[in-house]
Image (spheres, coloured by chain):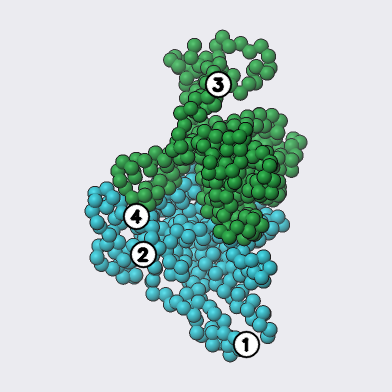
Chain colours: A cyan, B green
Amino acid sequence: MPDTLLFALEASLNGLTAGVMYALVALGFVLIFKASGIFNFAQGVLALFAALTLVGFQSGQIPFSHLINAMLGTRLHHFGWNMPTVLAIPATVLVMIGLAILVERFILKHLVNQEPIILFMATIGLAYFLEGFGDIMWGAEVKALDVGLPKGMSSAVDEATFAWFGYGFYIDRLEIWAAGIAAVLVAVLTVFSQYTKQGRALRAVADDHQAALSVGISLRFIWVLTWSIAGIVALVAGIMWGSKSGVQFSLSLIALKALPVLILGGFTSIPGAIVGGLIIGVGEKLFDFFMNPIIGGATENWFAYMLALIFLLFRPQGLFGERIIERV
Amino acid sequence: MLYREAGDYKTSYVADSQTFPIKFDRYGYYILLGFAFLVMPLIINDYWANSIVVPFLIYAIAALGLNILIGYCGQLSLGTGGFMAVGAYASYKMMTAFPDLNIIFVIIIAGMVTACVGVLFGLPSLRIKGFYLAVATLAAQFFLIWLFTRTAWFYNYSPTGMISAPTREIFGVPVTGPRASAVSMYMICLCFLVASAWLARNLTRGSLGRTWMAIRDMDIAAEIIGVNPLIAKLTAFAVSSFLVGISGALLFTVYLGAAEAGEAFGIDKSFLVLFMVIIGGLGSIFGAFAGAAFLIVGPVLLKLLLVNSLGWPTDLAAHLEIMIVGALIIVFLIVEPHGIAALWRTIKEKLRLWPFPY
């Protein structure tokens, strides 16, 4: 096989695994959008916050230590013990559920029946709030996150591809794990929403708020539930991105990258989020690979949005989205 | 009497449809304008101009522009930072290519260039709307910034990739570059702001503004009663981008003096202007001013309080600042979804009946 083709193949494989990461974030968006019609801009910051909290628990940081130090003149920073990952993850899940309850109590409850755009703006506000809050709570420096997932080049893929093509592909083991975990997550979510009572209630709310209310489904509970699930999905995404490139502010920017993914896949479709993520991941790697010599690098910054924009012109509701029917 | 319509008889249609129908309001407005043009230049100093007044004037123009697009025409845009960058780079190219051209024309032409780019990126709005459009405008934001940082022609092949404004004068007084005084910076921004506000106010209450509002309220119904969505949406994008471009050009030439696209016009600028529009009030000229004032003055006050009075580290104050901004946005949306402008309207209604509210 010619070398260019091999390199392109490697780039697209790497793109696939990167796409899984985008899809993980997009999944959280879709869940909340389906259940409450809210376009949750804070999903990326939610992932950042979850990862920060996890690192904070693991390393035994004292929350708000900077704030306390500034106010009282003390020099607190750590409790002096490390929490094992097995304990830290459930603790973080609890924090995310607590956050979901707070969001419902202080924001969503007051914004029932507002226009979608107002709710969208409220989530932007929430994103800013959480960003500042997370930094104050755990400090803003870049932190390494290690939950024991394997990292580095996957030698199995390297050897296998070398045996086939005479050229070893470089693929990070972490990304293979991420793909596996994402698959499990999607399977669990699908089973949950199809076969459990709460899952059915969730779909009922997504279908029609008023009808769901009239058969006795508690809307507020469902909202807490979806935001909790979205928080947990954010935690998974945060762990993956955090172990890959450290926990830092740029983590919240992946939320922006998830937006074109959503557009491609459609706002309401879980498989759409996955497929959209993969298309964007592969597309931007391949585009960069072929166009780099012609127009220069760093096209990842905008390629996804442009692709989404062009795609929208032909299919405004996304690949798997429900057809938008408008009436006057 | 204070703030009454009573006894203020309008005898012509023109008098009835003026911007400030109540005499008290009108004189207040004249006094404010007189203060801004005659008194402020005498008392303004470097600190006030640089930290509060000039940024307020510049961002108020951007907020006016975005308010036309979001508040009046209902098209959500997250590409403001990118359009400001277009204004800045257009003005830079004009200044270096035509050194004799007056800076005022440079800025206006920069606005026109931005309007063209805005129309180009507004074209998708004919087919897509709402959140989908917001994501589409993100494409403008990221693509434009990438273009300006990657294409050396835009920054005249300068080795740092920065653009810096040369000195330009109006009537012999330098208004850009390092020799510009606080007063001249203030005056040029003020003139542009007053002109922009006048333009925005008169456009939005004319027939064009009505077609925008019809599109905003329900686009299909508007189309059926004969509003051309193509013209309405694209003019909204053009006017909005024109104002945003002027504000970007002013930000670069007058205020910053030197800029780098990714840093000065990043996505955070888009959100800052968006917040100004939301907090100020969607669909209100006054709201654009109020929102800009709020988000420019608020952080400065907070910083003064926390860093200078309490001695907190600056990074902590910065985190607290974004946290408070975020919380304020949520509070505003819950308490008053239509922003400071709606609060002001309520106050005025109360004032008209005061002291006998029944």
The numbered mark at residue A55 is 2
Q: Residue at x 23, y 53 (%)?
A: A74
Mark 3 residue element = helix
The numbered mark at residue A137 is 4
**Circle nearer the N terminus (2, 4):** 2
Q: Which residue is mark 3?
A: B30
Q: Residue at x 29, y 64 (%)?
A: A60
Query: Where is residue A5 drawn, in percent x and y?
Result: 67, 80
Q: CA distance from mark 1 to mark 4?
A: 51 Å
Question: Could you say which quadrant of the image residue B171 lies in?
Answer: top right
Q: Chain of mark 3?
A: B
Query: Where is residue A179 drawn, in percent x and y?
Result: 51, 72
- Please say if the residues under marks 4 and 3 sit with CB atoms less than 8 Å apart: no
- Please say if the residues under marks 1 and 4 sit with CB atoms less than 8 Å apart: no
Q: CA distance from mark 2 to mark 4?
A: 12 Å
| Amino acid marked by disc 3 | Tyr
Q: Which residue is mark 1?
A: A165
